[in-house]
Each structure stands twice: as structure tokens, then as C-alpha cells.
Image (cartoon, rainbow, N blue to C red):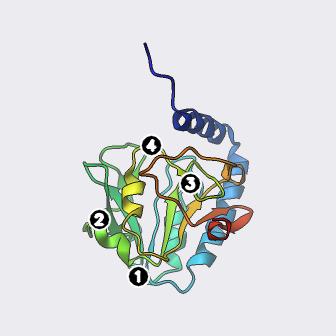
Amino acid sequence: MTEPPSGKRVLRESLLAARAARSELERTAADAALVAAARRLVAGAARVAAYAPMPGEPGGPTLPDALASALPPGGLLLPALRPDRDLDWVAYAGTLAPGGTIRALREPPGPRLGIEAITTAEIVFVPALAVDGTGARLGRGGGSYDRALARVRPGVPVIALLYADELIPAVPTEPHDRPVTGVLTPDGFVDLRQHR
């Protein structure tokens, strides 16, 4: 007897299908709006943790360069996936290489700063497939970001980049899931701390 698919898995598949169905024109316009808004949010910060979006993820391929251009040199940390699926961090210096374990991942080459480097970030941007009004975040299911977010200093904004229709009424959660404090969509920023 096979186990029925979990609510997370069904929702994840539906959201990934919807992303794949977006037109290139729609995605490009949405990504440009997200990148511009993200740059505004990091103005004045010294260190930000973010990510290099995989193909089809909100923000698109220009996100790391755009954020880095708004920060001091070495101010943007990007993740590098460790063999145990936890996240190490590397200061972004303008280049990305294919990730070692997941082909679609792009990681910065350079010295690894350790899993605790995220504690130095003043803002953390995370990938997500969906978020609800409580800040519950649906990722891709590896648990890497939930582990990393457990290390973020209290009070540091944790912001998911989404397309507008991915802020949804409810996301299934488990005890290990870490919430986000805000969502950035092409329509603007939503501070979820006000909704808790």
C-alpha cells in the first residue's frame, strides 16, 4: 500500500507547474520589479544573505549582481550546499559556478565562511515556493533553509521573494519549519510581523 502524497508535496508540485507555465515576458517583468525592490530594501546595509535563483525562481539571474552593487565589497553572502544539506556561506565576488550536488544550483566559488556566517547578516532573502500570512514558508523540501534560518539573529528580517500569486492563504507546516518575517513580490513588500 502506497502512502498518499503529503499536502506539502501536492502544493509544491502545483506551484512548480504554475511557475513553469509563466511566459518569459511575464517572468522577466516580474523579476525586474523584484530585483529593483530588493535593491531598495538593502540600501544602507553592510551585509546581506541571499541566494542565486535557480531557473524560473523569482528574482531571476540578475539578483546577486544587483544586490552586490548596492552593498559594500564582500557584503553579499550566498549559500553553498554542504554534503549534509546544510548551508555554508561565501562572500559573492561576481561569479557563480554550478553547485556540486544539485545541477540547477549556482554557487559562488571562494572561501567558505562556515554555517554561522548567516549570523552576520542584517537582512536575509530566502527562496520559497509559497508563503502564507503567518509567515509559513514552503520550500523545495530539502530542509536546508530551515536549518540556516534557525541561526539568524532575532529581529533580522527574513524575506521570501515570490511572484504575486504565491502569497497564499495557508501553507502546511511541520515543527522544524522556520517562518519568514516578510514577503517581497512584484507588487511590493508585505511585512508579516504585523499579521502574527
Q: Position of residue 151 (x, y in %)?
A: 36, 67
Residue at the image position 52 percent from the left and 59 percent from the top = 179
Q: CA distance from mark 2 to mark 3?
A: 23 Å
| Mark found first going from the N terminus, 1 or 3 | 1
* Label annotation for residue 73: 1
Q: Nearer the viewer, residue 185 or 154?
A: 154
Residue position marked by numbered label 3 in the rendering:
136
Residue position marked by numbered label 2 in the rendering:
115
- Closer to the observer: label 4 or label 1? 4
Q: Can residue 63 be seen by looking at this rendering? A: yes
Q: Secondary structure at mark 3?
A: loop
Q: CA distance from mark 1 to mark 2?
A: 20 Å
In which quadrant of the rendered image does the C terminus lie?
Answer: bottom right
- Closer to the observer: label 1 or label 3? 3
Residue position marked by numbered label 4 in the rendering:
141
Q: Mark 2 is on which residue type?
A: Ile
Which quadrant would residue 109 be assigned to in this image?
A: bottom left
- Closer to the observer: label 1 or label 2? 2
Q: Can residue 95 be seen by looking at this rendering? A: no
